[in-house]
Amino acid sequence: MTTEIATLGGGCFWCTEAVFQQMAGITAVESGYTGGQVANPSYEQICEGTTGHAEVVRLSFDPAVVSFREILEVFFTIHDPTTLNRQGNDVGTQYRSVIYYHTPQQQETAKQVISEMANVWDAPIVTELSPAVTYYKAESYHQNYFRQNPLQGYCAFIVAPKVSKFRQTFRDRIKSEMT
């Protein structure tokens, strides 16, 4: 099996992690930070909004099962790419919409999908497109957060509806053990 990497920021990483953990072809999902100027940032530093990092998920995926384009189609469905530096009540540059590309092919695909999404959304797309840079894994308590805390308030009212939307919109892309 060949594996590729995708790194995406769509607001709080708990939301994006929970969705992509259910997607067929995704072999691993990890929450982390990238795009900033501070080495080994902590969650507390990220929350201050002064490090320049975005909360992201790093996906390992099997391109024979799911394409980067399909991943981006889900990405643009589960968050609002028209709000600058915010998703819902989460406000700050750490919650920006961003695609960190790992190859020239990913960059080109992302440009195409962003262009196509401009016809779907009523407001301009503000998703940042940047080359992948140094990535830092988030603290262990952030990993698998929704799975471990489904009844926590944020998870119940913010994450769960995004997971539900994914499951309803992309029924054919759910991992078989999740159906």
Image (cartoon, grey):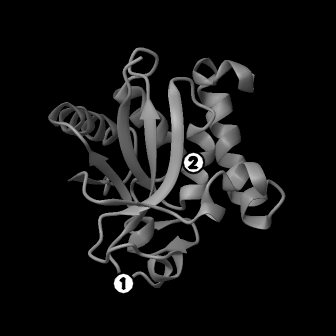
Q: Give the amino acid at mark 1.
A: Thr
Vertical placement of residue 2 versus 148, above or below:
above
Residue in view at x 63 percent, y 33 percent? 22
- Disc number placed over residue 28 in the picture, else none: none
Instruction: Name the residue tied to disc 2.
Output: 17
Residue in view at x 37 percent, y 47 percent? 7
Q: Callout 2: 10 Å neighbours few (<14), some, many (20+)?
A: many
The percent position of residue 116, horizontal first and vertical second, equals 29, 34
Vertical placement of residue 76 versus 159, above or below:
above
Quarter-of-image position of residue 133: bottom left
Q: Is residue 116 left or right of residue 8?
A: left
Foreground residue, 117 or 158? Answer: 158
From the image, which quarter does the N terminus lie in?
A: top left
In the image as oriented, which residue stretches furthest toward the right?
151
Foreground residue, 134 or 107? Answer: 134
Callout 1: helix, strand or loop? loop
Foreground residue, 26 or 92? Answer: 26
Cβ atoms at labels 1 and 2 below 8 Å apart: no
Mark sitting earlier along the chain (1/2): 2
Q: Give the amino acid at mark 2.
A: Glu
From the image, which quarter does the C terminus lie in?
A: top right
Count the numbered circles shown. Answer: 2
The percent position of residue 28, horizontal first and vertical second, equals 52, 37
Instruction: Name the residue tied to disc 1.
Output: 50
Quarter-of-image position of residue 165: top right
- Tell me if residue 76 can be seen: no
The percent position of residue 103, horizontal first and vertical second, equals 20, 37
Vertical placement of residue 28 versus 1, above or below:
below
The percent position of residue 90, horizontal first and vertical second, equals 54, 71
